[in-house]
Structures are given as structure tokens and as C-alpha cells.
Image (tube, rainbow, N blue to C red):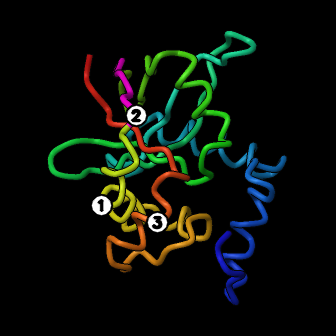
Amino acid sequence: MPPVSASPYRRYLRWLYRGGRPNRLARVLNRIQAVVHDTGLVMPRRLATLEVRGRLTGRPVSLPVVVADYRGERYLVSMLGERANWVANVRAADGRVVLRHGRRERVLLEEVPPPERAPILRRYLALAPGARPHIPVDRAAPLEEFDRIAERYPVFRVVSS
């Protein structure tokens, strides 16, 4: 668990996802962000909407994501770790999802093994300030520190289909 930050904003971000799940306000904010990211008009290319079929309901679930680029490839990271609902849904869907940013792109998400995650996690934290309160490593930390936590934070490579 990351140390409690003195910054009220960081405490607020942690409060939105207390217990590793989005609270009611976070769910509303996520829906709004997903719609904005979906248009592709206002936000940078790294902000997108992930659409994955719910493993229990079968209905599409949409949420905003930060797409991290590293060595010419794209990646999605679970800032909440293994317990994030979208991670379980992606695994149940065998990685078949849609990314939206002005257009729909059917992609395959391939899980990256923990020993390969450290540099991707560091790149993700450089791009996703909202994730920093949830991952217990400073974005400028050496890769060894990211290696220690890599097993707890799923990373998926985006493969165009």
C-alpha cells in the first residue's frame, strides 16, 4: 500500500478507489471520462476508452484508460492491481476488447509476464498522474523498485487484430 500523501489531491484520488474499487463518485467520473476519451477530440492519443464484455453480465463495460507507449508498442496497466474488475473481464474475454479514441479499434490484449513489466510500469506512471497515488513506487525510481511490485500490477500489450 502506498504511503499516505500530504497532498489533499492525492488523498482524494486514493479515496475515489478506497479498497481497490471505484466508489460511486469515481464510477460517475469514469463514465464522463470514457465519453470524452471516446470522441478523440479533446484528449491526447494516450487517453482512450476500453470496452470489454462483462464476464458475469455479458454486457459491454466501458472505462477510461491511459495507453502507455514503450519501445514502439502500446500497453494498458491496472493501477488498482489484480483486483480490478476490468482485469478479470479481459482475462475472461481471452483478451478480445475494443479501444476507442475517435474510432473503434478491435484489439487483443496479451498479458505481459511480471519479469518484463518494470520499464512499462515506469513509463505508465510518467504518463498517468492519476495512477501515481495507487502504485507504491515513485515514477523516477530505479527499475529495481518497479521489479519488486511488478507481480501485483497486471500489464497488457495491445495487439492490433
**Contact (Cβ within 8 Å) of mark 2 with mark 1:** no
Q: Which residue does the numbered mark 3 point to in the structure image?
A: 148
The kind of residue tagged 2 is Glu
Q: Which residue is drawn at 49% across and 44% down?
A: 154
Work out whether mark 2 precedes mark 3 in sequence or the reverse, and give the earlier one: 2
Q: Does the magenta stretch include residue 110?
A: yes
> In screen coordinates, is 122 left or right of 17?
left
Q: Which of 21 and 137 is in front in this view?
A: 137
Residue 15: image x %, image y %?
78, 65
Q: Which of marks 2 and 3 is in front?
A: 3
Q: Which of 81 and 10 is in front in this view?
A: 81
The quadrant of the rendering that contains the N terminus is bottom right
Q: Residue 33 carries which label?
A: none
**Contact (Cβ within 8 Å) of mark 2 with mark 3:** no
Residue 60: image x %, image y %?
62, 17
Work out whether mark 1 precedes mark 3 in sequence or the reverse, and give the earlier one: 1
Look at the picture and state if 100 lies above or below 119.
above
Residue 98: image x %, image y %?
43, 22
Tell me the CA gap for discs 2 and 1.
15 Å
Region rendered in magenta: 105-111
The kind of residue tagged 3 is Arg
Q: Residues within 10 Å of mark 1 (few under 14, many from 20)?
A: some
Q: Residue 111 carries which label?
A: 2
Instruction: Tell me the SS state at disc 1.
Output: helix
Q: Which residue does the numbered mark 1 point to in the structure image?
A: 119
